[in-house]
Amino acid sequence: MVHKPIESADRSEIRDHQAERLRETVERAYENVPFYREKLDEAGVAPADIRGVEDVTALPMTTKEDFRDEYPDGLFAVDDDELTRIHASSGTTGKPKIVGYTDADVDVWSEVVARSLAASGVEAGDTVQNAYGYGLFTGGLGLHYGVEELGATVIPIGGGQTQRQIELMADLESDVFTCTPSYALYLAETAEEMGHDPRDLPISTVIFGAEPCTDPMREEIEERLGVTGIDIYGLSEIIGPGVSNECHEAQDGLHVWEDHFYPEVVDPRTGEPVEEGEEGELVLTTLTKEALPVLRYRTGDLTTLTYDECECGRTMVRMDNVTGRADDLLIVRGVNLYPSEIEHAVLDVDGVAPHYRIDLDREENLDVMELTVERAEGTDRGHAELREEILERLANVLSFTPDELSIVEPGGIARTEVGKVQRVYDHRS
Ligand SMILES: [Zn+2]
């Protein structure tokens, strides 16, 4: 069921909203953010030139480097006393990206998360156990406000404390669990160690995000926990979680809440728009943000867009679930590989657990890749048999085989209890 009628409105109505809001956003950015005034002047675009959404392509792009250069609040369009909240996204290097919200921004955020939850099949009255980290990270509080907006009950437990998560889940009969995909699997393992059958836990839906998740990984989560697995997408620079979400009816792409965020897909090399249905880098423009309007943000996330009708009745565009980032690309001896391609190929092998790591090194000026894969609990397939099938599959699917393939026993690869999982270790630089 849709949370707001606009989710299934006529495309022309959605476009009218977008056009009006894009104009307002460009004006807000031009009038209040020197960075954008300069960029727009340079591009020779005035706010009055924006007549329809198609004019978005005339606007300059914003990158994560721009957030760093304008640290902490150079991209803000309001004075400090108009801010209600500040969050930050952790950078792997250097300073974090600081993001701010007005009262109205927090309301929009709550609403898009409530829509996302409704699309996931969550109803008022359900109990949502929120295992995203609270604090500067947008995951925890973002989900939290959306659950309240929907009229459901939130358990603000945050990340970690896995045994306690499981005890509380059982005692409070949580219906929904929100976390990263890797943590959902860790939860299942811990429940088993505690003597539970994970499928008997009361949760019927897991909403996962903040990490890429391939289809075999989702299937594993659904099977292990006996749940429906739903993908949520978002990023702090745009608002946080709740930019787009899968509908539980189709589980076939994530509906972008495009009356608030305008999506484009571009060629990551040239920045030029690609044809509908073609893969490229997702670029997002905020349409209603007050504190931090963002024009054409290059997310680095690879996806496709489809405007085809969805069986759930929503008319809002769907993006493919993000399984790779433009900057995740590994170049190994001149071969281009995404970790998600390796994940897809390896997890399809029967008897392999959904845990792996990739180590890259350089020996005598040559790239060397070691792939470590874990044997699934209870499989009767031996190492030699698994090794042969994995290598054959990688050679067939990717025309690439690692220099070393290690197969370890169940539990042999370290688990991540808090934060995002790391699977690639590049020791080359
Ligand atoms: Zn749908």
Image (cartoon, helix red, strand yellow):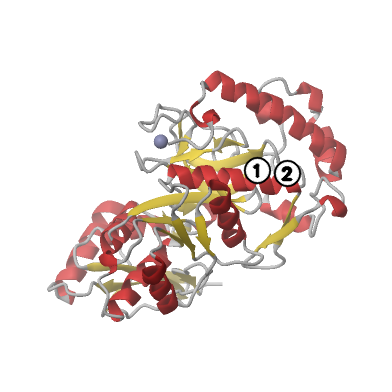
Vertical placement of 395 versus 76: above or below? Answer: below
Q: Residue at x 50, y 75 (%)?
A: 427
Relative placement, left or right, of 98 versus 240 is right
In the rendered structure, find residue 361 and report the number of the disc placed on it.
none
CB-based contact (under 8 Å), mark 1 and mark 2: yes
Residue under the image location 84 percent in, 47 percent down: 78
Q: Please state which amino acid type lies under the numbered disc 2.
A: Ala
| Badge 1 density bin: few <14, some 14–19, many ≥20, Cα 10 Å | some
| Residue at image location 54% in from the left, 34% down from the top | 4
Q: Amino acid type of disc 1? A: Val
Based on the displayed image, in which of its 4 quarters is residue 423 positioned?
bottom left
Res. 401 image quadrant? bottom left
Q: Which mark is residue 108?
A: 1
Question: What is the x, y in percent for residue 348?
Answer: 24, 58
User: Which residue was labeled with disc 2?
Assistant: 104
Relative vertical location of residue 118 with respect to residue 188 in this rendering, above or below: above
**CA separation, marks 1 and 2?**
6 Å
